[in-house]
Amino acid sequence: GWAAIEDIPAAPFDYLVFVPVPEPKTVKNRIHWDVDVPDVRLLTDRGARVLRRPDDEISWTVLADPEGNEFCAFVS
């Protein structure tokens, strides 16, 4: 039940790991990640869930990690 994203260019760390926790999300995220990816499927294949696709109002994809924390993906 976990997902990892590795080899993030110019990041001050080697990878991000999204690990489930037993308690449910109860408050708004304190931080918000924006990521550049060549294809959103790279994230969904690793456990992210699409909340909103690009449309007439936004040009990015809003996703949630396996725990429900939202983040945005910009296709580069």
Image (cartoon, helix red, strand yellow):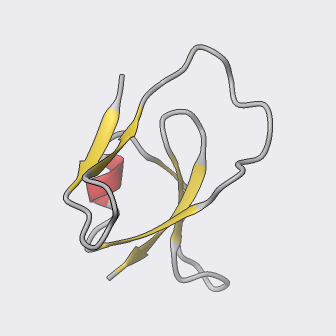
Q: Is residue 41 above or below residue 38?
A: above
Q: How many marks overall?
A: 0
Residue occupying image coordinates x 43% and y 76% = 74
For the N terminus, the quadrant is top left
Residue occupying image coordinates x 53% and y 75% = 54
Question: Of all residues shown, which one is farthest toward the left?
Answer: 7
Residue occupying image coordinates x 33% and y 66% = 11
Q: Is residue 1 above or below residue 32?
A: above
User: Could you say where residue 6 lies in the image, as x and y percent from the top left?
Assistant: 22, 52
Question: Of all residues shown, which one is farthest toward the top?
Answer: 22
Q: Is residue 21 above or below residue 40?
A: above
For the C terminus, the quadrant is bottom left
Of residue 34 and residue 73, the one placed in the foreground of this image is 34
Of residue 60 and residue 35, the one placed in the foreground of this image is 35
User: Could you say where residue 23 lies in the image, as x and y percent from the top left?
Assistant: 66, 17
Question: Of all residues shown, which one is farthest toward the front?
Answer: 12
In the displayed structure image, the side of residue 69 where residue 1 appears, left or right: left
User: Could you say where residue 61 lies in the image, as x and y percent from the top left?
Assistant: 51, 68
In the displayed structure image, the side of residue 1 where residue 55 appears, left or right: right
